[in-house]
Image: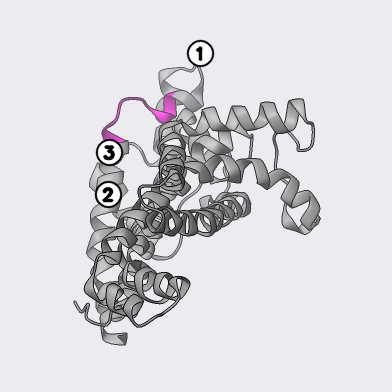
């Protein structure tokens, strides 16, 4: 196991190198000049050239790339062009809202979706199965921002039981934190509940047709034990796969949800940085998100070998 983990970690190094090169070239070949934006509408050519020299933008692209990679290997993501603060500090300031939203969302999705998927498979062909699948289709089809505005209208405007927007850190008290995280979590969890429930239903349904399931039932085992100990355990690999994909895709949903609920997280930081063409922040955030993707893939691969010892790489 340790050898496999070490090999997988080493395999991420060239992947992250290609990602870094791709991100750098993509941003620097795109139209627009941050020096012109910083200088303002009425700036002279001399001022623009002076700012470009200060930022190092007048150097060849490979020199800029080499400088950036060298700092990156030391944990330095650069300095924000507009706020003049280290990118790592800006990310640290915005980390808690995004991590909190991601954890509550994926936890809610797993707790709700897996039992729903197992129930739908167990009651396949009945009204329970059809109801779960209809809810899954609706949850997956409706855009996140639409769900968000519906939640705001129902719970914040009509019932007035939760705040419209904003975020309270958990240090301000569990009650304050929960009041601001409930609506964004319900909004973001919808598509993931739908996706995980559908995959769970399909996986468990396939397992329920296996001979060893019929044997377990013939031996008189109760249905709950057949479902939980035999069917769900053997259907876990595809479920873990889709949960891993869901966590990776969560980043895109977080950007939209944080904008709808005015949460000062990493999603809002990315949107602001793209609007201002703040290259260091954009590059740093993409590298951080790519690292999260790679880490999730590593954890999923490890989970495979734990759930099914026959799987070896």
> What crowding class fits label 2: few (fewer than 14 Cα within 10 Å), some (14-19), or many (20 or more)?
few
Identify the mark nearer the N-term, 1 or 2: 1
The residue lying toward the viewer, choosing from 27 and 121, is 121
Q: Nearer the viewer, mark 1 or mark 3?
A: 3
Secondary-structure class at tag 1: loop
Specify the farthest residue to the left.
Answer: 313
The residue lying toward the viewer, choosing from 109 and 215, is 215
Q: Residue at image x 67%, y 46%?
A: 182
The residue lying toward the viewer, choosing from 9 and 28, is 9
Residue 32 is a magenta residue: yes
- List x then y, in percent, for residue 313: 19, 77
Q: Return the residue at label 1.
A: 42
Residue 133 is a magenta residue: no
Secondary-structure class at tag 3: helix
For the residues marked 1 and 3, what is the alpha-carbon distance in whole angstroms?
28 Å
- Check the image and report above or below for 241 versus 266: below
Identify the mark nearer the N-term, 2 or 3: 3
Q: Is residue 200 left or right of residue 255?
A: left
Q: In the rendering, which numbered label is found on residue 184?
A: none
Q: Nearer the viewer, mark 2 or mark 3?
A: 3
Q: Return the residue at label 2.
A: 63
Q: Is residue 302 left or right of residue 37?
A: left
For the residues marked 2 and 3, what is the alpha-carbon distance in whole angstroms?
16 Å
Q: Which residues are magenta?
A: 28-36
Work out whether residue 61 can be spotted. Answer: yes
- List x then y, in percent, for residue 168: 74, 47
- List x then y, in percent, for residue 162: 76, 38
Q: Residue at image x 37%, y 69%?
A: 299
Q: Which quadrant is home to the N terminus?
A: bottom left
- Check the image and report above or below for 235 versus 86: below
Secondary-structure class at tag 2: helix
């Amino acid at each position: 196991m340790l050898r496999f983990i070490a090999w997988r970690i080493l395999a991420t190094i060239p992947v992250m190198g290609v990602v870094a090169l791709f991100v750098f070239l993509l941003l620097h070949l795109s139209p627009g000049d941050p020096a012109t934006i910083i200088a303002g509408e009425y700036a002279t050519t001399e001022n623009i050239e002076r700012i470009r020299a200060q930022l190092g933008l007048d150097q060849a692209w490979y020199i800029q790339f080499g400088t950036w990679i060298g700092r990156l290997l030391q944990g330095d993501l650069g300095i924000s062009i507009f706020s003049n603060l280290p990118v790592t500090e800006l990310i640290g300031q915005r980390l808690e809202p995004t991590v909190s939203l991601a954890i509550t969302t994926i936890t809610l999705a797993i707790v709700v979706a897996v039992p729903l998927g197992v129930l739908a498979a167990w009651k396949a062909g009945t009204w329970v199965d059809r109801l779960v699948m209809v809810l899954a289709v609706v949850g997956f089809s409706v855009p996140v921002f639409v769900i968000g505005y519906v939640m705001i209208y129902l719970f914040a405007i009509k019932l007035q039981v939760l705040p419209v927007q904003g975020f309270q850190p958990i240090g301000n008290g569990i009650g304050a934190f929960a009041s601001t995280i409930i609506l964004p979590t319900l909004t973001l969890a919808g598509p993931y509940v739908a996706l995980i429930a559908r995959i769970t239903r399909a996986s468990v349904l396939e397992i329920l047709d296996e001979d060893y399931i019929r044997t377990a039932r013939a031996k008189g085992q109760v249905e709950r034990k057949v479902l939980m100990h035999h069917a769900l355990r053997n259907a876990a690999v595809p479920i873990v796969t889709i949960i891993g994909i869901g966590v990776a895709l969560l980043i895109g949903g977080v950007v939209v949800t944080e904008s709808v609920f005015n949460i000062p997280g990493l999603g809002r930081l990315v949107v602001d940085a793209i609007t201002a063409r703040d290259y260091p922040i954009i590059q740093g955030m993409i590298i951080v998100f790519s690292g999260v993707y790679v880490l999730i893939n590593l954890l999923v691969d490890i989970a495979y070998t734990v759930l099914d010892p026959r799987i070896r790489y």
